[in-house]
Image (spheres, rainbow, N blue to C red):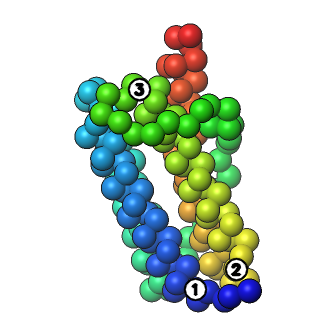
Amino acid sequence: MEKTSVNEILDFAINAEKAAYRFYVDLSEKMDSEAMSKVFKEFAEQELKHREILEGIKQGKTIEAEEVANLKIADYVVGVEPHPDMTYQDALILAMKREKAAFALYIRIAESTHDQELRKTFEMLAQEEAKHKLYFETEYEEVVLKEN
């Protein structure tokens, strides 16, 4: 098994957060609804904060994690690809799936390290992604499921 340095793991996570930021900015630009555009811009800003957290960790800072509820709606909806005339429902599904994948990534990274501080940090980032997923699942439940 190939060993990966802590800095390589952090650089990987930083690049993932940069990609998430770009994803939400792009998604915000595809929204017809000003309210949804704003929501996705706010999530882009949160991804920037995650990147800053990771960069801080590279400089020796530590962070605490908190538990977040899981409605598991993302487990049962079909994935969609971003497109210009995406519906609100499609955008929510896309965001839920992306946040679920980010959560799984951070959990896997946390489980792969023996450094307890680094493990706590990745667990905290996983919980941040869980919060995002919960937001989109709650919105889906309140808007999409109640309409149908």
- Which quadrant does the C terminus fall into? top right
- Per the model, the C-alpha gap separating discs 2 and 1 is 8 Å
Residue ID at (36%, 56%): 21
Q: Residue 53: where, in percent of width, then height?
A: 45, 70
Tell me the residue at 51%/28% (across/down).
Answer: 139
**The one of 87 and 51 positioned closer to us in this rendering:** 87
Q: What is the secondary structure assignment of the residue under circle 1?
A: helix
Q: Earlier in the sequence, mark 2 or mark 1?
A: 1
Residue 75 falls left or right of residue 141: right
Residue to which mark 3 is pinned? 88
Q: What whole-number distance in Å separates the C-alpha atoms at marks 1 and 3?
A: 39 Å
Residue under label 2, please give it: 113
Q: Is residue 2 above or below residue 65?
A: below
Q: Is residue 134 visible?
A: yes
Compared to residue 97, the image places residue 5 above or below, namely below
Left/right placement of residue 134 relative to residue 51 reads right
Q: Are marks 1 and 3 in contact (CB under 8 Å)?
A: no
Q: Residues within 10 Å of mark 1 (few under 14, many from 20)?
A: few
Q: Nearer the viewer, mark 3 or mark 2?
A: 3
